Image (tube, rainbow, N blue to C red):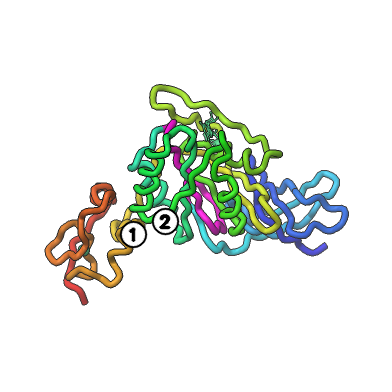
Amino acid sequence: MTDLAGIVVALQANYLEVELDHPPKGIPERLLCTRRMRLSHRGAAVHVGDRVQVQAIDPVQARAVVAAVERRSSWLTRPPVANVSLVAVALAVDQPAFDADQASRFLLTAERTGLPVQVLLTKCDLLDDDRLALLRDRLRGWGYEPLLLSSETGLGMESLRRRLQDSALSVLCGPSGVGKSSLLNTLLPTLSLRVGALSGRLQRGRHTTRHVELFPLTQGSRVADTPGFNRPDLPEDPRELVMLFPELRDQLDPWPCRFRDCLHRGEPGCGVHRDWERYSLYTAGLMECSSVSRPSRAG
Ligand SMILES: Nc1nc2c(ncn2[C@@H]2O[C@H](COP(=O)(O)OP(=O)(O)OP(=O)(O)O)[C@@H](O)[C@H]2O)c(=O)[nH]1
Ligand SMILES: [Mg+2]
Ligand SMILES: [Zn+2]
């Protein structure tokens, strides 16, 4: 039999769970696969979201072997997911409390993919309308139009569904405990993903979701639940950081500065203004990036 094409929907220990695009009659749609020897040398290179070719299919056991991995169209490093088309960053309005630095780290990580980024403000039932409007305006100032959601009341669920349906592969990422799995349970009631109570004074999540997994939303669209974590790293190159703040990016076209490689920290001849909320986060981020080089004359 010729190889069949599919997508890796989950990883478990040494196995890849693959969903076939078009399972022929008598072959299950989902197969538990090992990697071919040649592939296992680069074993870590196969991730959820990867498109693969499988062979040596055992229809009774629903087992097969992954023989080849196709080139990726995009790559999200953390959480690791291939071929993503939309990064949805979930941030709770409260429990855990909204934290601008942490939120920005998730957004910067998402922006590094170059893909569309959608902010999801979760647990909106916990905030009154005035404070909610303030937070929404704050996110708009950062260059995002957030969806206001609550799994508790169902607020915004149809907007979320529409947004995710338009995208072949959306990833839900964000801190632990913000309610990512709860959103998916509300959207897809047959799922019943594990959801965990918060703990401690800071009302942190308890890392309930342990693995990345893809779920079908409609024919042609999938969504990934991912394990939350608390503090994504910034890129090492400060020049990359510059391009990851939408509200800074907006100020750079046309280029307003005297020097081509200006880092916009108030250098002489810098045309970027400083009255934007995340300016201090941006400059602190530059300090954190490992190497900060000096501006030179525009060429
Ligand atoms: N008030 C309120 N609580 C919610 C809402 N959504 C989720 N929660 C609660 O928040 C806690 C964490 O929810 P999860 O869905 O497990 O969060 P998660 O983002 O998947 O967490 P990790 O898997 O650890 O990354 C649970 O106690 C949920 O009941 C919501 O809309 N409103
Ligand atoms: Mg979860
Ligand atoms: Zn500048």
Residue 174 vertical placement versus 273 (above, below): above
Q: Which residue is drawn at 65% across and 47% down?
A: 215
Q: Residue at x 34, y 61 (%)?
A: 243
- Ligand 2: give its quadrant: top right
In this rendered view, identify the residue nearer to me: 237 or 15: 237
Q: Mark 1 = which residue?
A: 240
Residue 133 part of the magenta-drawn span: no
- The residue sitting at the left extreme is 268
Disc 2 residue type (three-letter): Glu
Range drawn in magenta: 77-96
Q: How far apart are marks 2 and 1 (CA)?
A: 10 Å
Question: How far from the left and from the top, in percent, is residue 78?
Answer: 47, 47
From the image, which quarter does the C terminus lie in? bottom left
Question: How far from the left and from the top, in percent, is residue 137?
Answer: 36, 49
Q: Do we see residue 223 in this rendering?
A: yes
Residue 176 vertical placement versus 215 (above, below): above
Q: Which residue is drawn at 41% across and 51% down?
A: 109
- The residue sitting at the bottom extreme is 299
Task: Identify the secondary structure beneath mark 2.
Answer: helix
- The residue sitting at the right extreme is 26
Q: How crowded is mark 2: few (under 14 residues within 10 Å), some or many (20 or more)?
A: some
Q: Is residue 174 left or right of residue 161?
A: left
- The residue sitting at the top extreme is 200
Earlier in the chain: of badge 2 and badge 1, it is 2
Specify the label residue 111 is tagged with: 2
From the image, which quarter does the N terminus lie in? bottom right
Residue 90 part of the magenta-drawn span: yes
